[in-house]
Amino acid sequence: MKILENTQFELAAAMLQAHYESQPLAFVHSYGCQQNVSDGERLRGSLLRMGFGLTDDQNEADLILLNTCAVRETAEDRVWGHLGALKGLKRQRPELMIALCGCMTQREEVSERVRRSFPYVDLVFGTGAIHMLPQLICQRLSDKKPVFYSSDQPRVVEGLPIEREGSVKAWLPIMQGCDNFCSYCIVPYTRGREVSRAPEAVLAEAQEILAAGYREITLLGQNVNSYGKGLLEPIDFGGLIKRLDSLPGDWWLRFMTSHPKDCTEALIDTIARSRHVARHIHLPVQSGSNRMLKAMNRHYTVESYLALIDYARRTIPGVTFSSDIIVGFPGESEEDFAATLSLVERVGFNALFTFIYSKRNGTPAADLPDPIAYSEKSARMQRLLDTQSAIGARLNAAQIGKTLRVLTEGPGRSEDGTLMGRTEHNTIVEFTGGADLIGQFVEVTIERAQNWALFGRLAI
Ligand code: 5AD
Ligand code: SF4
């Protein structure tokens, strides 16, 4: 573990003050998963500490920082598109600094493409170098030529300033990296091997979050269930949850992502006994076919997955599940896909995140023959979405008439003047109420339902 020294920020602040006539502004955009959003919050915090102001308008920014995602080609394409669109801005204002960080930058072919096609990018650094931001910006200002910093393995750096994005729900990373090597996934190559944060550091951050008034904490890691590997103090994820659960107050604890191979009955027992852990588990299954699970290197079977779901349902009354599913993995037959549909029906997830397989160079699956036409993959995706939409509608309709506890998160989506929040089961609820309820737990009586949300009124 490394503790960051303040001098790096002070040196950078002095250099920025000398370089810019007025306070420079930074625009930070994070693509991809919550882990990346959480990295983005540390980048924003670091920029503030260096003396930057933050802006949502890239046209007025002195620094544009794109925190990228590499999980699918579409995620990368969005970044390439964004970079292309910045060319004009850079021509108008050559002093604008454009920086790229995050998962994409860890890929050799990406750095090459940046050098070749986007020579106006000033700074490129990887997921393991977030704590290097002050030095890298200073280097760019003094060198007058682009800086490419390729970092080694990710490490846990404590003490980075954090500028969180919301005021009700907070992200709390408990580990970095991934050791699982699912055959389709780029993450172990972009984020490196698993490293856990010390439990004291996690606990201290949770205390800070709660003291700042947040009502929900989501623990983040690529595989939270393997938390604790390599730490001096013997502790596992269940142990960490128990320690966090002892923190007082009215708040919910969530976590993601769980890997079914490491999610144990003991962990489910811990959740059942906890006061703060929300009764909802995000448990990505990826496929309902054992043949595909093997090819994906997932190390569990449909049967063991369903047994875990059944155990959780018996142990945690009312628990709900969400999942990730990949459609059209190389070699997925109609039978394999039908098995996925039947698993989805059998579990009855209350939300599903669905993705068409995207080939990632450097992963084992990229070498597999992939004869299925994209049009067939899209058709399967539509069938999966239709199946899930019917399940969502059915599960939500069953809530009509009930009064549910809801954490109010912000304005609603359906109508002006509505608020939205979630139940501990992670179901979205919209209702009418004043903005003073944001950040409060309220009771809502459900009057109608759609497949994506419940609608109701405040119970008196
Ligand atoms: N193609 C499509 N989906 C992918 N995911 C990860 N890698 C790929 C890929 N190459 C999905 C998985 C994972 C989620 C975060 O992204 O479902 O759980
Ligand atoms: Fe997150 Fe994976 Fe995308 Fe990296 S590649 S930002 S870990 S989803």
Image (spheres, rainbow, N blue to C red):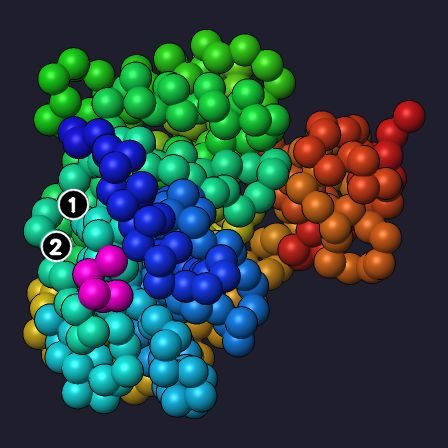
Name the residue at 61% across, 36% down.
168
- Split into 4 quadrants, where in the image is the C terminus? top right
Magenta region: 138-142
> Which residue type carries mark 2?
Ser
Residue 182 is situated, as x and y percent measured from the top left of the image, at 18, 54
> In the rendered structure, are the residues bearing label 1 and label 2 in contact, judged by CB atoms less than 8 Å apart?
yes
Residue 65 located within the stretch drawn in magenta:
no
Q: Is residue 25 above or below residue 95?
A: above
Left or right of residue 363: residue 199: right
Mark 1 burial class by Cα count in 10 Å: few <14, some 14-19, many 20+:
some
Q: How many angstroms separate mark 1 from mark 2 (CA)?
A: 8 Å
Residue 73 is situated, as x and y percent measured from the top left of the image, at 30, 75
Residue 55 is situated, as x and y percent measured from the top left of the image, at 54, 61
Quadrant hosting residue 431: top right
In this view, the residue in front, 402 or 60, is: 60
Q: Give the residue number, with chain letter if any, for mark 1.
A: 154
Decide whether the magenta segment is chiefly helix, strand or loop.
helix
> Which residue type carries mark 1?
Pro
Q: Nearer the viewer, mark 1 or mark 2?
A: 2
